[in-house]
Image: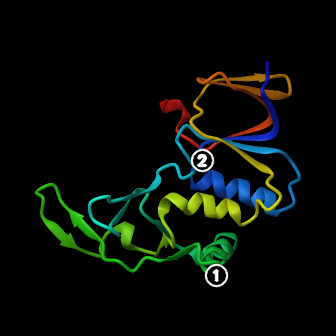
């Protein structure tokens, strides 16, 4: 028995899934969309941990920032980044890059590939970046969210997908987007 039917199901709730869903809604894609995420919320590998011991101290890890090279060669990407900057969703990351080599020597350097191009950071926290991207365009609440939902079975049946989760939910969809490391689960 199918619990919910959608036009598009997106597995994974990270930055790429949020950008995809938000842009579909922005471009007047009038359909039911759901994001299914195994974690507790949006963000995927972009997360922020706040210290309970040291007030105000936070650590972005997983995907601590965004590094974008050659932005001028992709007008769509440049427009999107400029929109995020204008709406104060992201900001330039001008912090120093510190590299620790295998001998545990610290080294401040801009000679590494990661330091090339523009580096951006969420204006709030990396954990909130995906959510803020979705809020840009989900004004009609077209996107539903299923958290703590790990898909463990996929089946394509004639013209639609049937997905089953470990917690017993079943979804039906015309289209499926896999934005996660589903195969690793």
For label 1, the crowd category at 10 Å Cα-Cα, with few meaning under 14, some 14 to 19 and many 20 or more, is few
- The answer to whether residue 92 is above or below residue 170 is below
Residue 160, position in %: x, y? 82, 29
Q: Nearer the viewer, residue 86 or 140?
A: 140
Residue 58, position in %: x, y? 36, 64
For label 2, the crowd category at 10 Å Cα-Cα, with few meaning under 14, some 14 to 19 and many 20 or more, is many
Q: Is residue 97 left or right of residue 125?
A: left
Residue 48, position in %: x, y? 42, 58
Determine the secondary structure under disc 2.
loop
Color style of the picture: rainbow
Determine the secondary structure under disc 1.
helix
| Residue pictured at 76% horizontal, 59% vertical | 138
Q: Which residue is mark 2?
A: 13
- The answer to whether residue 9 is above or below residue 68 is above
- The answer to whether residue 76 is above or below residue 140 is below
| Residue pictured at 78% horizontal, 45% vertical | 33
Q: Which residue is mark 1?
A: 86
């Amino acid at each position: 028995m199918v619990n919910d039917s959608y036009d598009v199901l997106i597995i994974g709730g990270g930055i790429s899934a949020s950008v995809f869903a938000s842009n579909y809604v922005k471009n007047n894609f009038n359909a039911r969309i759901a994001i299914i995420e195994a974690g507790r919320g949006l963000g995927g590998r972009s997360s922020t941990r706040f210290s309970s011991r040291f007030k105000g101290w936070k650590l972005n890890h997983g995907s601590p920032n965004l590094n974008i090279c050659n932005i001028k060669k992709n007008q769509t990407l440049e427009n999107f980044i400029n929109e995020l900057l204008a709406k104060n969703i992201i900001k330039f990351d001008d912090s120093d890059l510190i590299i620790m080599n295998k001998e545990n020597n610290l080294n401040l350097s801009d000679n590494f590939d990661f330091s090339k191009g523009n580096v951006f950071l969420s204006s709030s926290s990396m954990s909130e970046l995906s959510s803020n991207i979705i809020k840009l365009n989900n004004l009609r609440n077209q996107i539903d969210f299923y958290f703590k939902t790990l898909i463990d079975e996929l089946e394509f049946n004639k013209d639609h997908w049937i997905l089953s989760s470990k917690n017993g939910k079943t979804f039906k969809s015309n289209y499926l987007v896999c934005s996660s490391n589903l195969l690793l689960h």
